[in-house]
Image (cartoon, rainbow, N blue to C red):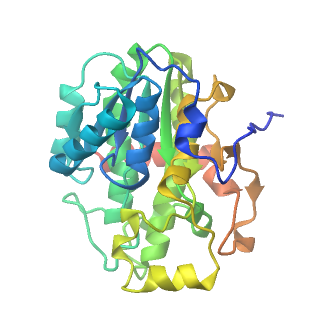
Amino acid sequence: MTTRVTSDFDFDSTALEVVAGLDLSGRRALVTGAASGIGIETARALAAAGAQVTLAARDTAAAERTAADIRATTGNSDVPIAQLDLMDRGSVDRLVADFSGPLHILVNNAGVMAVPELRFSPEGHEMQFATNHLGHFRLAVGLLPALRAAQGARVVSVSSRAHLNSPVVFDDIDFAERAYDPALAYAQSKTANVLFAVEATRRWAEDGIFTNALHPGAIADSNLARHYPPGLLDELRASGRYTFKTLQQGAATSAFVATSDLLDGIGGRYFENCQQAVVEDPKAAGTDAAGVAAFALDPSAAERLWDVSEEMNR
């Protein structure tokens, strides 16, 4: 029986509050999707604690503006940028080739959500699965030597409570046989993020690398919602069906999973509001659902996903 990890932080905590008093001097971090949304605030918190933080983003101009802001607000000048398009294998491979030395913290934060029409990666895989899971899988595996060199590294896999809506449908990941549903495509990609944490920890724990997944919270001001129909966010705000977080609050659990001493030697788990989530029945999931689905923690599904991901990334 494993002990559930809990903390004094909660829904309202911010990323900067989570890292207050921590000294990450000498540690190196890389955050994907670091030029927008909670990626910015995750990177800001790690930099504020003294880490070197590489901002990986598709738009290098936006990344440089973000880096300048983080340098100014934290006093940490060691905030380099790197170009990264998770849909472009060449971009992922170039970042891996250019990265040298140890990597103590990898935050797989970038993502896409609610793509309205079925779109594919250049290799023919559904866009949300290809971006949210396959791109990050390729990046993490490519950076494995750097993670090993850290002699104690953490990988943070940003998932979502939306995972409760679908397991990975192994027989039809790319929607070749079933009707495309943007929400279900997003959900299975987020389940994949949790399963990755389970299997990566099984494979890499002996190297001192531990991976955990998390739900950051519902965040209205994130660029992640850019594919929503016009007016939907305003409707959701007015409905009261969701309790939204600020960007600073949304980055808190990422910062917690990346830095807390409570997670030393712990991996393969799923967190929300800076607490380890309990297993819940997805059928009971409502608009403010919490918890993690058992299918997202299933070791056999995690191992199968790893094998499938290797095949898809060939």
**Residue 140 placement (x, y as % from top left):** 37, 35
On screen, residue 90 versus residue 31, left or right, reads left
Does residue 35 lie above or below 168 as drawn? Answer: above
Residue drawn at x 53%, y 53% as measured from the top left: 250
Q: Is residue 30 above or below residue 21?
A: below
Q: In percent of the image, x 30 and y 49: which residue is there?
A: 35
State the residue in front, 267 or 59.
59
Quadrant of residue 310 within the rendered picture: top left
Residue 256 occupies quadrant: top right
Question: Residue at 44% of width from left, 69% of height from top?
Answer: 185
Specify the quadrant that holds the C terminus.
top left
Identify the residue shown where x is 48% and y is 74%: 183
In the rendered picture of this protein, how many numbered marks are placed on residues?
A: 0
| Residue 152 position in % (x across, y down) | 51, 17
Residue 55 placement (x, y as % from top left): 29, 38
The answer to whether any part of residue 160 appears in the image is: yes
Say whether residue 267 is left or right of residue 193.
right
Q: Which quarter of the rendered picture does the N terminus lie within?
A: top right
Picture coordinates of residue 114 (x, y %)?
40, 73
